[in-house]
Amino acid sequence: NAGVTQTPKFQVLKTGQSMTLQCAQDMNHEYMSWYRQDPGMGLRLIHYSVGAGITDQGEVPNGYNVSRSTTEDFPLRLLSAAPSQTSVYFCASSYGWDTQYFGPGTRLTVL
Amino acid sequence: GDSVTQMEGPVTLSEEAFLTINCTYTATGYPSLFWYVQYPGEGLQLLLKATKADDKGSNKGFEATYRKETTSFHLEKGSVQVSDSAVYFCALQNSGYALNFGKGTSLLVTP
């Protein structure tokens, strides 16, 4: 089992560029989610999904888009990157509301 | 709303010292409580959890007891090792899917 994998590990964007952060899990978990981690603020939920075709917003959804076409994948899209989106992004998955398993993270810098 | 407060870091200890990291929470109802650990350059890993009052979570020598009367979930370890150097996050999960994290406490253990 690879668990939760994320690509890329690092990314630098210019303001206004778009990109997709990839997340995949091989544990057949129904629930997947995206968090961002900012210094001194812990992790905050961006979006989550309770199954293929079903997504919902978390605490800080603005500027991000998600879709879930398969159980395994849950990509996060930045449509027009802003410096305020500089952060470390973590994907997580779980079986229902049970323990959430986190990926290694993507460090994003927006110039 | 729900919130988690944990002690500010960084915490620096000598090897074999006793560790306490304080965590208190504010929440309605009966949340589940977690400690996650983040080693340098890695994602978060679940360290331990407790789902109801007076439960004790334990793992790798770490312990925390869910105290509803004091709304606390303090993390303790009797003898820390250099390999315990990491950032520790207290979190709660209440009426929804999202984990509500504290800001994290950095621990450095010196030989």
Image (cartoon, coloured by chain):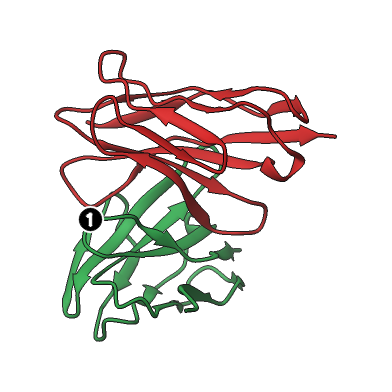
Q: Residue at x 36, y 76 (%)?
A: A27
Q: Residue at x 55, y 65 (%)?
A: A104
Number of on-image labels: 1
In-front residue for pair A39/A29: A29
- Seen in the image, is A58 located left or right of residue B109? left
- Seen in the image, is A28 located left or right of residue A42? left
In-front residue for pair B43/A15: B43
Q: Which residue is mark 1?
A: A97
Is residue B111 depicted above or below A53 in this figure? above
Q: Residue furthest bottom?
A: A70
Q: Is residue A33 visible?
A: yes
Q: Residue at x 45, y 24 (%)?
A: B74
Q: Residue furthest top?
A: B69
Picture colour for chain B: red
Label 1 amino acid?
Trp
User: In the image, residue A85 lies at what x, y percent?
Assistant: 48, 58
Is residue A48 depicted above or below B111 in this figure? below
Picture colour for chain A: green
Is residue A105 depicted above or below B93 in this figure? below
Residue B86 sits in which quadrant? top right
User: In the image, residue A12 lies at what x, y percent?
Assistant: 62, 71
Label 1: chain letter: A
User: In the image, residue B16 lies at what x, y percent?
Assistant: 74, 28
In-front residue for pair B95/A60: B95
Q: Residue at x 38, y 73 (%)?
A: A76
SS at circle 1 = loop
- Mark 1 Cα-neighbour bin, 10 Å: few <14, some 14–19, many ≥20: some
Name the image quarter holding the N terminus of chain B: top left
In-front residue for pair A23/B19: B19
